[in-house]
Image (tube, coloured by chain):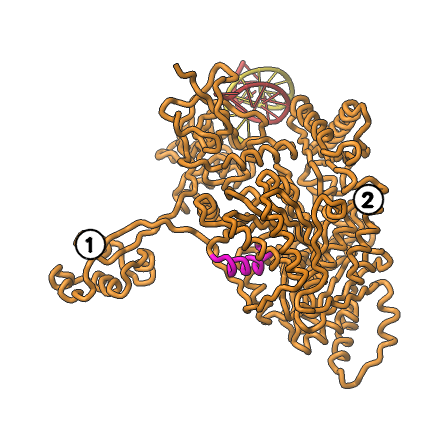
Chain colours: A orange, B yellow, C red
DNA sequence: AGCACGCCGACT
DNA sequence: GTCGGCGTGCTC
């Protein structure tokens, strides 16, 4: 007699436990770990993922699985163990990790849909205002789409809770409720119309079958040319109705076949053919990587290659070898929509075996991409952070490009770091990892010095292009000294012209040196990138009478003025306010806008150089999938002269015609209370400088700052990573910061300020007591820089665990788990506790 | 995360 | 006396 089998199932809720369901006998053979199961959970029906099959049930009343949703395992054994590690290390519920690894909308869940009752008009008497608002909304929505609405859709639109009200309206026969399943994204099939007659005999066929319809004749005609045509091409492009197709099908003159259609985003960006010849250092790096690949053992590399040194070529050559060994590869990039050039080069080299994953894919595109990974079509996946969970089999290599980039850290649950987790996934696959960067993180560079990673270096730019010349401009000094001493060549009349304009607009944030340099490059028809790492027009509004800076009512940051919308906008919560010009505290009208954002820089540049084509690139203008690639292509083709943007223009772009990069304000972020502030400044300045001078014309860079005495500017100017590293690593060591320790942050968050504060103190004391060996270093809890976001008050606590006392980090991990358990069991739900392991953002 | 249950104040 | 607020606890 066989004992009944049970399945432990992970659900997409922030709960640590798995739930056990019995496996009905007809599903015995199909229920396996890694497959999705449809189950009823509480009142709802939801999709879960089977984690393991067991013989024992932990509770008496066990429900049974309704159905198994996958024929093949959707999550491999290897991915399950990877998810387990992520869940364990980053202290995130396993279900959340598992579900973040599969496309969201392929899952089924039951939903209640509401619609107006047939006789609702008769029951409308004596309604309160709130009810009328809902009924109006539903009426409008039903007219528009005729689809039924879920409660959460309605609540979202009206921004109120509706539980009770909806119940009442149902009792009164005004609304009807209907329960059904959400419809998951499905595979897409297209109909292929295939010729089923001899094309040479078309004339006689038309007569024999008595075909008089012009549309049918046209269709037959088209099929004499092509044997097969997609139905949508016929109906849309050739205006042949489906009825005509059906009539010919009945007459057996055509066949209709269904074919799986894979949705894919089109590649807009393209570039000229480059003759690529590897230099000696590149070959050396590739040889070392190939040696490691040959051993089929886990091996991490740090590829330190200056900007323009040809890191991508090294990745490509290494991956060619991976494919030769019949293995697969993942290539992580910081933000995928920002690297069309890298994708282009991979697609050109590897064709259809390259798949792309990122958050902006539609549900359909995502589903099709995952299917093609599972069926082995895609052997290389290029993508942002989440691509690390791609269900590739037999992974031979993981590349983390621009490994220093902070966007590898996910800032919501599960708060994993893609770069670090990549190391682990490679480890369990006996694969090679390449961390590549021109400005490696202190952590990674340190690891390459201690031998934890093998160090590879590309010290020169490909094809002997020299690094740009970098000038640091101190804005505080500039006005006084510069103009007086400048001698003007009467023939360089354009300079005079600019001076006039400069004096007229009295721009405070653009130095004359930079403006002149821009003018010179424009004359030569060369391209310019201007970095201003702040959106909007003015950064803040300050009252000259009382000193008040207009801030968001829900967050503790200043509001940014956006001229295009004529609004003050909060960059945290998106709240907007109309610009009144009157101080909200004292009523004074002496409100002075200060600080320039990208919008302002763009406008001033257009004023000074009205003939130049200027484009702004920031999250305000880059709203759609295609527009980013479009702008980059236009810039590449020199249809744009000057590109003004936030740090999204500093990453991985390769434009041969850019010979000038200007950093409008290098101090943004430099003074943040974060031990990585200097490191980030060095990285962003070096990265953006690297966009200049990528062809045989030498590039120039102007960096404007008010703090030219900071050592980081010297190191940027001299392209001296090593000097920067050596001075920064000393500070880290002295203060016991990473890489000498791990840092985790615990944050409490609540509408109730006192509650958040008292709970962070409680956690502090709780840890103090647990850590009786005094292995951890706790910084006193307090409010972070952004002490309020969306009306929620925040408090945080930094925990340092030194590598000496706790080499594996297990000690801190276990204490953090205790904190989580303690807070889940003892804290009211009004206060949220966030545990951020290896925190990147300390603000 | 939802959802139900249950305990308190403000209304007929 | 009830209606409706949200705080707490459970879901295999």
Earlier in the chain: of badge 1 and badge 2, it is 1
Residue A345 located within the stretch drawn in magenta: yes
Q: With A614 as the anchor, is A175 left or right in this view?
A: left
Q: Nearer the viewer, mark 1 or mark 2?
A: 2
Residue A247 numbered tag: 1
Looking at the image, how many numbered discs can be counted on the residues? 2
Mark 2 lies on residue: A732
Q: Residue at x 72, y 60 (%)?
A: A459
Residue A751 located within the stretch drawn in magenta: no
Circle 2 Cα neighbour tier, 10 Å, few/some/many (<14 / 14–19 / ≥20): some
> Marks 1/2: CA distance?
78 Å
Residue A309 image offset from top left, x and y in percent: 67, 62
Q: Which span of residues is magenta-colored?
A: A337-351
The answer to whether A656 is drawn above or below residue A402 in the figure is below
Dot 1 lies on which element?
helix
Q: Main secondary structure of the magenta part?
A: helix
Q: Residue at x 75, y 66 (%)?
A: A701
Q: Residue at x 56, y 59 (%)?
A: A340
């Amino acid at each position: 007699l066989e004992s009944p089998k049970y399945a432990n199932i992970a659900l997409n809720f922030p709960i640590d436990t798995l739930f056990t369901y019995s496996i009905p006998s007809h599903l015995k053979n199909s229920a396996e770990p890694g497959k999705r199961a449809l189950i009823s959970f509480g009142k709802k029906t939801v999709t879960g993922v089977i984690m393991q099959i067991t013989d024992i049930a932990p509770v008496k009343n066990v429900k049974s699985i309704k159905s198994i949703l996958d024929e093949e395992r959707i999550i491999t054994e290897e991915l399950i163990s990877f998810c387990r590690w992520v869940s364990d290390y980053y202290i995130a519920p396993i279900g959340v990790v598992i579900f973040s690894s599969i496309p969201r909308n392929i899952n089924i869940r039951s939903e209640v849909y509401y619609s107006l009752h047939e006789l609702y008009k008769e029951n409308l008497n004596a309604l309160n205002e709130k009810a009328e608002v809902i009924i109006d909304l539903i009426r409008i929505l039903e007219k528009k789409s005729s689809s039924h609405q879920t409660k959460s859709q309605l609540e979202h639109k009206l921004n109120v809770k509706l539980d009770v009200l909806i119940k009442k309206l149902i009792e009164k026969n005004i609304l009807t409720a209907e329960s059904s399943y959400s419809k998951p994204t499905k595979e897409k099939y297209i109909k292929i119309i295939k010729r089923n007659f001899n094309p040479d005999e078309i004339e006689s066929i038309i007569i024999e079958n008595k075909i008089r319809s012009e549309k049918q004749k046209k269709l037959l005609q088209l099929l004499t040319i092509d044997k097969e045509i997609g139905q949508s091409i016929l109906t849309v492009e050739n205006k042949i109705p489906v009825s005509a197709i059906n009539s010919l099908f009945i007459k057996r003159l055509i066949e209709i076949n269904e074919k799986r259609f894979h949705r894919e985003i089109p590649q807009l960006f393209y570039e000229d053919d480059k003759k690529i010849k590897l230099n000696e250092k590149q070959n050396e790096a590739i040889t070392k990587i190939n040696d490691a690949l040959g051993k089929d053992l886990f091996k991490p590399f740090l590829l330190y290659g200056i900007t323009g040194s040809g890191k991508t070529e090294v990745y490509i050559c290494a991956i060619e070898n991976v494919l030769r060994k019949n293995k697969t590869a993942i290539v992580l990039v910081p933000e995928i929509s920002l690297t069309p050039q890298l994708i282009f080069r991979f697609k050109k080299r590897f064709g259809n075996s390259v798949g792309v994953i990122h958050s902006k894919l539609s549900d359909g595109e995502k589903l099709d991409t995952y299917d093609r990974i599972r069926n082995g079509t895609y052997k290389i996946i290029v993508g942002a952070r989440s691509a690390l969970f791609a269900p590739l089999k037999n992974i031979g290599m993981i590349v983390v490009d621009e490994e220093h980039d902070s966007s590898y850290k996910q800032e919501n649950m599960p708060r994993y770091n893609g770069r670090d987790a990549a190391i682990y996934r490679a480890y369990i696959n006996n694969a090679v990892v390449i961390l590549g960067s021109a400005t490696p993180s202190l952590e990674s560079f340190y690891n390459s010095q201690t031998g934890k990673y093998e160090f590879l270096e590309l010290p020169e730019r490909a094809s002997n292009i020299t690094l740009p010349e970098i000038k640091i401009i101190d804005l505080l000094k500039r006005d006084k000294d510069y103009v007086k001493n400048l001698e003007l060549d009467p023939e360089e009349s354009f300079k005079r012209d600019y001076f006039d304009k400069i004096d007229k607009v009295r721009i405070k944030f653009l130095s004359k040196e930079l403006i002149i340099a821009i003018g010179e490059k424009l004359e030569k028809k060369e391209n310019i990138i201007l970095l201003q790492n702040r959106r909007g027009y003015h950064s803040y509004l300050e009252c000259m009478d009382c000193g008040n800076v207009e801030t968001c009512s829900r967050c503790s940051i200043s509001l940014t003025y956006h001229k295009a919308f004529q609004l003050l906008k909060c960059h945290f919560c998106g709240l907007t306010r109309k610009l009144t010009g009157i101080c909200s505290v004292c009523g004074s009208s002496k409100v002075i806008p200060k600080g320039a954002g990208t919008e302002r820089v763009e406008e001033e540049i257009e004023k000074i150089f009205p003939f130049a084509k200027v484009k702004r690139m920031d999250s305000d203008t880059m709203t759609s999938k295609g527009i980013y690639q479009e702008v980059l292509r236009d810039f590449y083709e020199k249809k744009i002269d000057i590109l003004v943007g936030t740090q999204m223009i500093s990453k991985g772009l390769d434009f041969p015609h850019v010979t000038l990069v200007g950093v409008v304000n290098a101090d943004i972020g430099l003074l943040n209370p974060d031990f990585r502030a200097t490191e980030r400044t060095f990285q962003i300045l070096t990265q953006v400088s690297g966009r200049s001078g990528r062809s045989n014309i030498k590039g120039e860079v102007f960096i404007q700052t008010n703090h030219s005495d900071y050592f980081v500017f010297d190191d940027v100017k001299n392209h001296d990573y090593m000097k920067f590293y050596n001075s920064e690593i000393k500070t880290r060591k002295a203060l016991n910061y990473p890489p000498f320790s791990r840092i985790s942050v615990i944050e409490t968050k609540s509408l109730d300020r006192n509650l958040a504060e008292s709970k962070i103190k409680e956690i502090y004391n709780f840890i103090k007591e647990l850590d009786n060996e005094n292995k951890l270093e706790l910084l006193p809890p307090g409010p972070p820089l952004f002490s309020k976001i969306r009306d929620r008050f925040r408090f945080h606590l930094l925990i340092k665990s030194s590598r000496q006392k706790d080499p594996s980090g297990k000690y801190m991990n276990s204490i953090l788990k205790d904190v989580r358990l303690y807070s889940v069991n003892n804290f009211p739900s009004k206060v949220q506790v966030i545990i951020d392991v290896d925190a990147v953002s300390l603000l």
